[in-house]
Each structure stands twice: as structure tokens, then as C-alpha cells.
Image: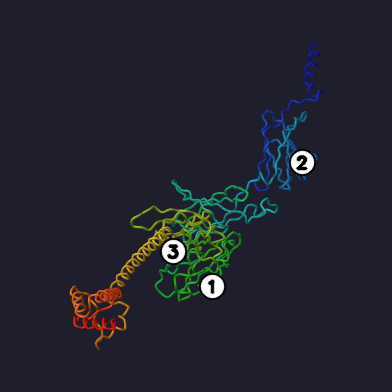
Amino acid sequence: MAIAGLLSCLLVALAPRCAGGTNLKSPQDIQVYAVNTNFTLRWNYTEDDTHVMFSAQYRWFEDFETDETEWKELPGCQNVTLTECDFSSAITDYYIKHHLRVRAETREDKSPWSRIFEMIPYYIAQIGPPGIELQSTNGVIKIKVSPPEANRVQKMWIDYLSFKYNLVIWEKSSKAEFRKQSIFPTDTITDLAPETTYCLKVQATLPLDAQEGLFSPIHCIKTTQKAKDLLCPTNVRVLALNMMFHLHWNSQYKQRVSYTVQYLLGYLKKLHSDHSANWPHVHGCENITNTKCNFSSIITTALGFYYLRVQAMNEYNRSCLSDEVKVDPLVTNEIGPPIVKVDISDALLHIQISPPGGSENKVLRDHYDLSYRVLYWKNSSNNEEEMKMKVIKQTIGTVSDLTPSTLYCVKVQAFSEAYNKSSHFSKDECIRTAGDKMLPLIILATFVSALIAVLLVATLIIFVLYQAYNQIKYVFFPSCHPPSNIEDLGGQPFSHPYLLTTEEPTENFRIIESIITEETNQIDFKDYKHSKQSSRDSGNYSNDDDTSGSKVSEEVLEKEIV
């Protein structure tokens, strides 16, 4: 009876194995941790069994198009008792896809495989810590940084020139303030307190891949006292306008001294080699006594950057170097004001802009992508208006809706949004707009109308004066003369006008009555009267002398009778 029960229990225990089952569970949470080319596979296992071991397999893909290869045992991860293993030796290609899986094992049993973990080594690897060498001298700390994997034959990060290094430094005290800055592989840390212990750590990064590495171990070093040398140039600074660069510095040395400006191409700072001998002299800035120098000739490209320093040398050939100053041409440079010309035509204000530095300055034109801020306003004491603004990209602009006969002023500012830079405004340029076009027409019409009116009035006056002149001339200066038979009478010229008086007919009538008969007198008197009337109508004149008139009448009558 007891033996039957024992056999029954044994069959129950062996039933899962006989049926292809297992009592072991699969590992969970498969992860890979990679630093540089060091790869560690980790997982979790919840079963409490000291006899359980773990084994892993892997496969890789030659490319993303082909099928996966067969599963192979993962070197370094066979029959391990821990929940992690190092399989760095198995990964030789860091840019192809890999699959990993793990299972638990005992002598009698094996668990199902875990879920597959997929990875591309390069994208999951973390940048390791760089190496550091420190030296304290003259109040500063000189640092030399070695790239990650510097001593490794097989490297994950091939382009070590792409590394950038971040430094974190602080005083070794209870109230430490952390200071962060970017450094080069070979650099100098300045602005430190003398006789003070500083601690620091460095991190390597790949900005293009947005990867940040692990910090190096913390290193501490004590600074020294800085020697004060009056020969060394101080306050080295760069002033640049429209891509013309000038270096200025101060001198504390009172004796004779000469200066030489040296420069270093920026990319050399990225190298891990020693570049102390790669500082050439700036042409035209050698052995000068001035404390300024034009170094525009070395700026051969606007996209690079440069470092400059000044070497001072006294008459005893003792020299001292200034601190270095960095020059990033497009960042250091300041934009000057443009030159503006204005003109008026067709009720438009035309604005012509000459770019800062002139049209031949291609660096400003091509790299800054300049825009122009145009301010214009009416310059009138009686009409003060706010300035109006318009932004243009071209060097030619127009302003419409102008007021006639008004003085407009314009000033322009150049600016670059890409570099957040702007120039000063140009000097004011003013011009007066033309008057209203209707006003000249009105003035012309008024003038023509007034001229016509004056001509009409003058013509009327001349006509009236002419008529009056004719009347006066007709009365006092007749154009006709007396007949020849009476023009010269009695040997005396007939020069007096004939004026008829009231006595004249009576006196003439008396002379006629004393000479002729009554019948003849009537006939002749009629003829005489008729002749006398005709003489009056013709404007003839008689002598004022009565005797002369009687003689003339008697002679005429005698001739008629005969």
C-alpha cells in the first residue's frame, strides 16, 4: 500500500517532463548595458533556486534585407550563475542588428527562452569617461584631456575629433559652487583663486549624435600664487566693425618694449597634440610699439575661429605672453550703419541703401542675411507725427501716400536675425515732396484770365483814346486845305481859320445891296449864299478882317455879272 502511494507521487512529479513541460520560469527584463565597446547582458530572475544557471544565445543580420542567421551560443554567457554576463568579445560589428535571448537551466530542466532583445550596438553604447592630466602653475591649472578609448585597439568612436568636453570645477569646501565650461583637449583654466584646492571632472560629448558620456573620476589640485609681471600685456580685446578687425591691449611696462601679435587657427585647438609651436606672427604686427594692431589679413574665412595673444619683449630680450582671446568673426564683428540716398518721383519716396561696408563686402552680404529697418517721418514743426517703420530685404524701397510740399526724413538700420545683431541708424536724409499738381493749373488759369482782362481793358482804353484823338484832330487839325482860289487872297496868306460871326452875314449883305439891283441882287444873293454855305461845309476859313471879306465879295459879284 505504501509502495503504491510512493509510485503514484513519483509519476505525478515526472508527468510534466514526460509530457514535454518544465517547472523553470524564463528570465525577465532583458537589458544590455554598453560603455564604449564593453557590453554587459543583464536580466531578472525571481525563482529562489541556488542550482539554477543561465545561458544566452545571439544571432545577427548581415543587413536589414536578409533573413536572420542561426542562433549561436553567446560567448561569456554560458552556464553563468549571476544574472549578468560580459559578451564584449562577441560583438565585432557595431552597426548591424543583433538579437539576444536567455534561459534558465538546471541539471534536470531548462526553461523556455526569454523574449528576444534587439539592438544595434552603436546606438545603445554610452561614451566612456575621458582621461585627465592636470598641472598647477602661475595661478592657473593646465589640463590635458585624453579621448575615451584612447588606449583601446578596437574603438566604438572612430572620429575622436568630434568630441567636445565639458568641465565641472568647484572649490573643495563645504559651500562649493559648481562652475561649468567647455574646454579643449589641451587648455588652461583661469580666473582661479591662488593657494586654493579645486576639484574637477570632465565629460565627453558628441553633439551631432546628441550623446553625452560618463564623467571622469574626480581630480583635485591646489593652485599656486600668480606672479605679477608688468611686462605682460593686459586687457587684450578685439574691436571689429564691418569685418575690419583690430586688437587692442594695455601696457603697464614703463620702459622700452616691443610687441608681436601671434595667432592660432581654431581647429588646432581640437587636436589632442601639442600646438604650442603653431602660433605664427600676424603680418604687420611684429615688433611694434603701439598697443593696437589691425589683423584683418588673417581672417581668411568667416566660418572658422581664431585665437590671438600678444608677446611683449623688453630691451633685455625677456618676453611675456598675454592671455589668449578668441575671435569668432561673425560673432565678434559688429555691423556698421548703412548709407542712404533718397529721391522723389511720381508721388513716391525712393530709398536707396548701400549695405554696411559697401557693396563689395561679400561676407556681410552673404553670411549675415541682412534686413533693413526703415524709419520715415514728416519733419515739420507744425505737424509732429510719430515715426513710421517698414522692414525690407532689398536695398531699394519706396514710400507712398506722401503729402505734397512736405519735408520727409528717412533713416535706416541694418540687422541680422540669424546673429541677433543690428547696426546704428544711418544719418537722417531729408527731401521735400513736390507741390499739388492742381495748384500750378489754377495759378496758370488765373494768370491767363487776368492777362485777357487786362488786354481787353487796354484795348477799350486805346480805342476810346483813339476816337477822342480823331475828334480833336478833326476839329483843330483838319486834314483838308481851302481851295486854291482863296488860299492866297490880297497877297496875304490865308492862315486863320474861317469863323462865322453874327455880324458877318449882315455886313456882307449890306455890301451886296449897295452895288446891284434888286433883281440881280436876289439871284446873286442866292448864289452867294449857296457858295458861302458850301464853304462852311468844306471847312474853309475866312479872314477876320471885315474889309477883306467885303472886297472878296465885290470882286466875285463883278465877275459873275460880267
What residue is shown with label 3? 235
Sequence order check, earlier mark of 2 and 3: 2
In the rendered image, residue 542, in percent from the top left (x then y), is placed at: 24, 79
Q: Quadrant of the N terminus?
A: top right
Image color mode: rainbow
- Closer to us: mark 2 or mark 1? 1
Q: Quadrant of the C terminus?
A: bottom left
Q: CA distance from mark 1 to mark 3?
A: 22 Å
Of 480 and 415, nearer the camera is 480
Q: Is residue 24 left or right of residue 504?
A: right
Q: CA distance from mark 2 to mark 1?
A: 62 Å
Q: Is residue 550 left or right of residue 295?
A: left
Give the amino acid at mark 2.
Arg
In the rendered image, residue 289, in percent from the top left (x then y), is placed at: 45, 74
In the rendered image, residue 54, in percent from the top left (x then y), is placed at: 73, 35
Q: Is residue 297 left or right of residue 45?
A: left
Is residue 334 visible to the viewer in this orientation of the structure?
no
Give the amino acid at mark 1.
His
- Closer to us: mark 1 or mark 3? 1
- Residue under the point 59% across and 59% down: 270
Is residue 361 visible to the viewer in this orientation of the structure?
yes
What residue is shown with label 1? 283
Of 463 and 354, nearer the camera is 463
Dot 1: what SS? loop
Eyeballing the image, is 510 above or below 166?
Answer: below
In the rendered image, residue 349, in percent from the top left (x then y), is placed at: 46, 59
Dot 2: what SS? strand
Outermost residue to the top: 1
Dot 3: what SS? strand
Give the amino acid at mark 3.
Asn
What residue is shown with label 2? 59
Q: CA distance from mark 2 to mark 3?
A: 63 Å
